[in-house]
Amino acid sequence: MTDLPPPPTLWQQRDFLWLWGGQSVSLLGSQIGGTALQFVAILTLGASPVQLGWLTVADALPVLICGLLAGVWVDRLRRRPLLIAANLGRGLLLLTIPAAALLGVLGMGQLYWVAALVSLLGLFFDLAWPAYLPALVRPEQLVEGNSKLSISDSVAEIGGPGIGGLLVQLFSPPLALLADAASFFVSSLSLAAIRTPEPPPPPRDLSQHPVTELMADVAEGLAVAFGQPVLRALLLSAATQSITNGIIGTLYALYMVGTLGISPLAVGLIVGVGGVSALGGAFLAGPVTRRYGIGRALIGSRLVGVVFNSLMVLAFGPHALVLAFLVLSQAADATWTIYAITETSLQQSITPNRLLGRLHASIRFLTALLLPVGGLLGGYLGQTIGSRAAIGIGLLIGGAATLWLIFSPLRGMRGMGDRRVGIEDRGTS
């Protein structure tokens, strides 16, 4: 009996390369645009701190208001047309800013609306692409596929803000947004070139009232997220970690500059170490999961990340030693990338495709809800006990988030194909 030829790698799968290439361009453009949009508000319109705060609110509100409903529509529609439409919409919205600036009619009100609508379309895109990827690759290739997409994200995070700043300096903040808009159009063309047929969405139960059907779909997504033991552990761990992220995100700059006396330039360079480390983690995710199994990779990467991150609150002594501790703390970002890639791949592997949009929407909604809770808690703790102690409490909460994983069926999981933890697909809702 002759051996079958080995399956093609993702480098040989044309349609995945189109997805990867388009996503890479879009991610870079988004990093450029995120920098440029802030400068439009600050340099072009002279925004006050309060106005900048409202701009942040406009960007965050769509997830809280529409997050769960967006997951329903992602599961009701074909994902590729939705991805293309979301990118085209974001590109057209961003074009309105340089157009209004050239006409002399640009104001903060327009920035609020553009930020909110771009965030809303981005929510649909971010929920749709993890649900679309399993239609292009086999289950055993999910880690590799997510790793490649994560590499693009890390590269964009490293280079995008600098490119955005350069474009702002060479041209103007509104014109720099043209690069972001163009990236969305290029990504749409790349997605349009994909030829792999996508499975049709499940038929809807037209006997129900539309509102009743909508609520039933939302409830089904929440039931999957909270009802399946592995997915529940991942969700609760992410929610707990979101509180930690809110605490540290609120106090990190204050702690670095105010408590440790680190210069803003040094802060930027230290954070850049995290971006480089995250890029390394994208390359390591596949080998780590193959070597240790899914469960150990998830639990181990989180524990190692917590241990290294704790070095930031242990940064005492001479200035050089403080910098060394901070750099080592950022170097642990590779572990968070390994975790994120493995987590997404596992969710894609054990969840029926028709539920993936609602699953990720449930996670996004809960983490977005708890992030500001962590931010407010961090502000209160920082004011009462100091930023170092407050960040330490945040890290303890992050360590506790790992307990959800340890005391779950994840401990015994080896590979993505472990159907013992899969969800039985009972058809349409």
Image (cartoon, rainbow, N blue to C red):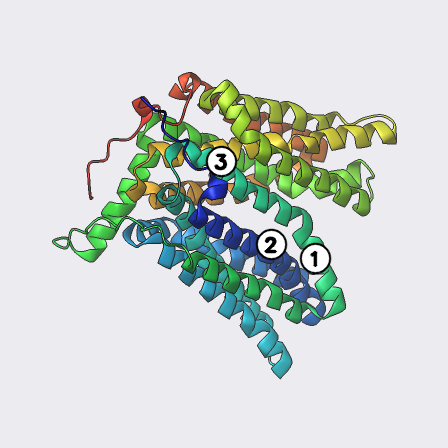
Give yes or no for contact between labels 1 and 2 (Cβ–Cβ under 8 Å): yes
Q: CA distance from mark 1 to mark 2?
A: 9 Å
Image disc number at residue 163: 1
Number of residues whose C-alpha sits closer than 10 Å to that of mark 3, classed few (under 14), some (14–19) or many (20 or more)? many
Q: Please, which residue is most extreme toward the bottom here?
A: 103
Q: Is residue 262 left or right of residue 300?
A: right
Q: On the image, numbered disc 3 is attached to which residue? A: 144
**Residue 314: in sight, yes or no?**
yes
Q: Quadrant of residue 424?
A: top left
Q: Is residue 395 left or right of residue 387?
A: left
Residue drawn at 47 percent across, 40 percent down: 10
Q: Position of residue 418 (x, y in %)?
A: 35, 23
Q: With respect to residue 167, does 351 lie above or below?
A: above
Image disc number at residue 195: none
The first of marks 1 and 3 along the sequence is 3
Give yes or no for contact between labels 1 and 3 (Cβ–Cβ under 8 Å): no
Q: Position of residue 100 (x, y in %)?
A: 58, 78
The first of marks 3 and 2 along the sequence is 2
Foreground residue among 167 and 306: 167
Q: On the image, numbered disc 2 is attached to which residue? A: 28
Residue drawn at 35 percent across, 35 percent down: 225
Q: Amino acid at mark 3?
A: Glu
Q: CA distance from mark 3 to mark 2?
A: 20 Å
Mark 3 or 2, which is nearer the eye?
3
Q: Secondary structure at mark 1?
A: helix
